[in-house]
Image (cartoon, helix red, strand yellow):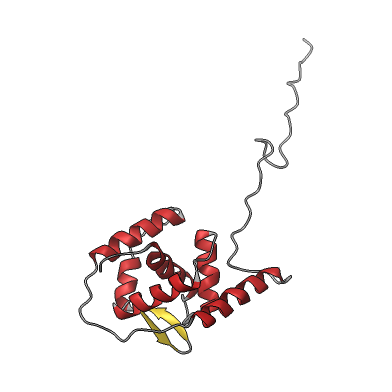
Amino acid sequence: MYPVHDVDALLLLAMALASKRRPAELAEIIAAADLVQGSIPSESKLGEAFHRLSMHGLIREAEGGFTLTPDAQKIMTGQPRKADAQERILGIKENLSAYNPQEEHPPIQVAEEQLTAAILAHRASGKTTGKNMLVPKPKAAETNNKRPGQRKPFPARRFKA
């Protein structure tokens, strides 16, 4: 598959996160992409990535959402668990560049209006008071090296002889 774009790898990673148990909706894919990269690509780039990846048989429409095909799942395997987002995207890009599609598939056409609505829905959900499970947990700041409940030992008793 040549040329490989950053948006293609980001979309595959976001779909892998969003469609673990069921096909993901557009708003869920957008939320996952925002979580991975910290920003959302433009609607036109996302639409082109959907078109490219579906033509090569890596994503498909199912049950009102989108999911990865078995070929895409093979591309996603082997990613290091402790790697940050940029390292994962680079690894996916390498796997995509080595991928050769066997046949042409029908492209998925996602309108820019649908993508715009999904982005707006994601931004609106971020402003609500509900808990978003895709947001990473904040790390506790270490103030000192002591463990909780640890105290200084008493000095040794001296016996009178």
* Residue ID at (38%, 84%): 108
The answer to whether residue 38 is visible is yes
Tell me residue 36's x, y (percent). Answer: 50, 61
Q: Quadrant of residue 141?
A: top right
Q: Quadrant of residue 124?
A: bottom right
Viewer-proximal residue, 100 or 52? 52
Left or right of 95 in this view: 19? right
Q: Quadrant of residue 133?
A: bottom right
* Residue ID at (31%, 80%): 55
Answer above or below: position of 157 versus 115. Answer: above
Tell me residue 26's x, y (percent). Answer: 51, 79
Tell me residue 142's x, y (percent). Answer: 65, 41
Viewer-proximal residue, 130 or 121? 121
Tell me residue 157's x, y (percent). Answer: 76, 20
* Residue ID at (68%, 36%): 144
Left or right of 140 in this view: 69? left
* Residue ID at (34%, 62%): 92
Number of numbered markers: 0
Viewer-proximal residue, 158 or 116? 116
Answer above or below: position of 28 versus 62. Answer: above
Answer above or below: position of 79 versus 60. Answer: above
Left or right of 95 in this view: 132? right
Q: Give the position of the N terminus as an image quadrant.
A: bottom left
- Work out which residue is located at the far top of the displayed protein and give it: 161
